[in-house]
Amino acid sequence: MPVWSTIIIIFLFALLFALQVWWRGEFRRVTETTAGEIKNLKHRLAAEALEHRAQQSAIFNSMVEGLLLLDERGRVQLANRAFKKLFEATDVVLGKTVLEVLRLHELAEMVESLGPNQPWLDRELKFPGPAERWLQVSAAIVLNGSGERQGTILVLHDLTRLKQLERTREEFVGNVSHELRTPLSLIKGYTETLLDGAKDDPEVATKFLQTIDRNARRLDLLIQDLLTISALESGRVALNCQSLNIRSVVERCLGDLKIQAAARKVTLTNHLPDLMAHADETRAEQILSNLLENAVKYGREGGTVIVGGQETDGGKLEIFVQDDGPGIPAAALERVFERFYRADKARSREQGGTGLGLSIVKHIVQAHGGKVWVESEVGRGTKFIFTLPAELETGGEKTGK
Ligand code: ADP
């Protein structure tokens, strides 16, 4: 082989080797750059996904409605804060089915009935448990980018309070109608009888007119009490609190009750020292006259009614009205402050009671920041106790608390 050919071959081999080394270096560099870029991209996507999830959970957790997100197999993927609060649930619900979590077949059926022909549903459901609970449930299917079902979303809105308010309102309207109907039908009946001829007999006419008058007064009283209750409940009553000698208020109320007490031979006793309250005078008088009137009405004929009280350490006045009457049965004790509740229905009606007096007392006491309660023993008597803020004296000046 000629020398030149050998040199050329060696040169070509050297060139090939150099090219290979360069190519390897270049390949490694490109691979490393690409791997770095892919890694960065992955990080960015993961960060974005994380941010998206954080935003999603911030939105879900800020909702007042409970929310459940189910995956395509119907298992809980996400439960927001409101849901956990509503059902006192924890993350343990994750991965479970709706039936396992809420134990309500109607809800499971609702989820199952969703499909392309029925992508969403709304229903009011009553949830079992010790306390009655009503929820409005909205269920909708969740689709992915290609329009396939990816899961289900459930939004649960608590209707319990609304339902309770609705029921209270219905009961209230029912009670008011009932209370109005009795005196009204009596007025109507007696008026018709008078017009039919009874008016010609002066003795009978007087008796009938007295009954009409008594029932008209009862209606008037009922309407006044209803207006007071409605004003107190809506918070429309502005209290004009000032320094008030409670003993003087009691004296005034006892004076007004003298005739009623004499008719039942009841002795009225005021044991209250000169205590200064920070209260609205008219409203304080309303509390005391209601309690005192009840004590005379429902207490023992020939019995004794005592008013007493003291200032307590917490800057409050604790005042009581006590009688030695038949008392209130234990089962009725916690209900006597309810509107229209009567422990002894026949007695209350006969005495012209509206069943609203104690409810008014409770509202007024609470509007002053106080409390009212009752202690009673059947056959021995009843004691109503309430608190009012005491007038505080600072440096000769009097201020309310
Ligand atoms: P009413 O208009 O019927 O007197 P209240 O709200 O004042 O309504 O009282 C509710 C019920 O509580 C009364 O119907 C009565 O049965 C009972 N009650 C109230 N005060 C007394 C009392 N001192 N002794 C026994 N029962 C009482």
Image (cartoon, rainbow, N blue to C red):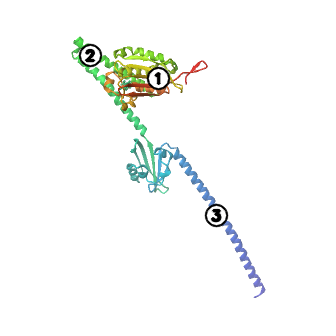
Look at 35% across and 16% down and name the residue there. 265
Q: Residues within 10 Å of mark 2 (few under 14, many from 20)?
A: many
Look at 45% across and 48% down and name the residue there. 154
| Residue type highlighted by circle 1 | Ile
Point out the tag, 1 or 2, that comes first from the N-terminus.
2
The residue lying toward the viewer, choosing from 263 and 301, is: 301
Above or below residue 8? Residue 291 is above
* Disc ID at residue 101: none
Identify the element where label 1 is drawn: strand
If the picture is divided into quarters, which one holds ligand 1?
top left
Quarter of the image that includes the C terminus: top right
Measured Cα–Cα span from mark 1 to mark 2: 42 Å
| Residue 377 figure quarter | top left
Residue identifier under label 3: 35
Residue identifier under label 2: 208
Is 100 left or right of 348, judged from the image as shown? right
